[in-house]
Amino acid sequence: MKEDHALIRLTNVSKAFQTAAGPTWVLKDVSVQIAAGEFVTIIGRSGSGKSTLLNMITGIDRPTRGEVCVDGVSLNRLSEGQFSVWRGRSLGIVFQFFQLLPTLTLLENLLLPMDFAGCIAPAQREARARKLLERVGLEALADQLPTQLSGGQQQSAAVARALANDPPLIVADEPTGNLDSRAAEAVFALFLELVQEGKTVLMVTHDAAMAQRAPRTLVLCDGELINEWLARALPDVAHPELLRLTHALRPWSGGAVEPGLWLVQAGALEVLDRRGTLTRSLTAGQWAVLSPSLHVRAGAELRAWCLPQGELSALLAGTPELAARLMSTEPARKRWPW
């Protein structure tokens, strides 16, 4: 993804909370870019910083260091009043516990954000609210109170409310965490539909299987972002180990291509036989183990990471199944979905 196309850009974002023992850092130098129209899931153990990361993007909290930019707007520079206006027009939030107002009907819950933001003409608001409820299958329950609905119905209503002002970005924090599998599947399917329509969706989830169905997944561990390409190549490795390996990665900066696990982010890494004939080319989203006997060269605009042979050998020594998988699968099959 080119930097100019980023809808969301976090640059060296860190967040600390003050405690009696001093600052506790829950995010540490997180940098990431997300393009408009992407569906991105965020996973990690409890306490890894997932919700805090979302809070940086939604403006619910502010970074201690670093910059958060959404659709060209630097959130660091907004006052609280400006935040409220920006959030109402640019962002839809879906919470784990629905957060529907219990004394208002579903219809009134959807009308309220329209009244606050003023993006939708007053004469169009009720029709829009009813259309959104129809989209999530709740049109017949428009006059019901949230407490009269099941958990899945309440979460569907919460998604409809998040769409009230037609924001480009939908952020969901564990939206399926309190739902049964059928209701969770319905909410996930709705997010997929929204992405197909051009919305950008960020979803924190504890469900690794569901997260892997999204085109892109960010993995957090102890407040740090694990290298995305490494996480895709080694999905079965524990997060603390992936974080350690992330620290061991070397970005390619020209010169010789050393042996190890290579992860191509952009451009091409060309593999040659002994006669110098091109045998295969690793392109963006592909990875392969390159041995010392191979001849390789960097193609145009190569951006890649290397896990050095020593680190890779130590990892594979105790995991023969992983070694077999990495060594036997052709690189052409190791393409990611973005």
Image (tube, rainbow, N blue to C red):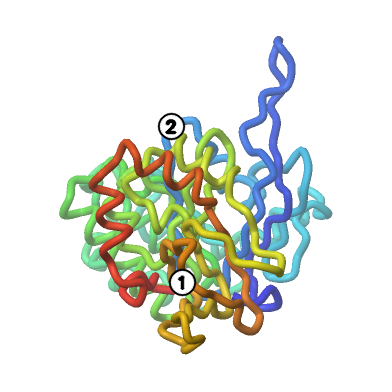
In this rendering, would 153 be left or right of 94? Answer: left
Viewer-closest of 220 and 81: 220
The local secondary structure at tag 1 comes to: loop
Viewer-closest of 86 and 321: 321
Q: Where is residue 328 drawn, in percent x and y?
A: 26, 63
Q: Amino acid at mark 2?
A: Ser
Q: Is residue 16 above or below residue 336?
A: above
Q: Where is residue 258 drawn, in percent x and y?
A: 57, 61
Q: Is residue 111 above or below residue 173?
A: below
The answer to whether residue 265 is seen in the rendering is: yes
Q: Where is residue 103 drawn, in percent x and y?
A: 39, 43
Q: Within 10 angstroms of label 2, few (less than 14), some, or many (20 or more) residues?
A: few
In this rendering, would 3 be left or right of 320? Answer: right
Residue 285: mark: 1
Residue occupying image coordinates x 36% and y 64%:
214
The first of marks 2 and 1 along the sequence is: 2
Q: Circle 2 is placed at which residue position?
A: 46
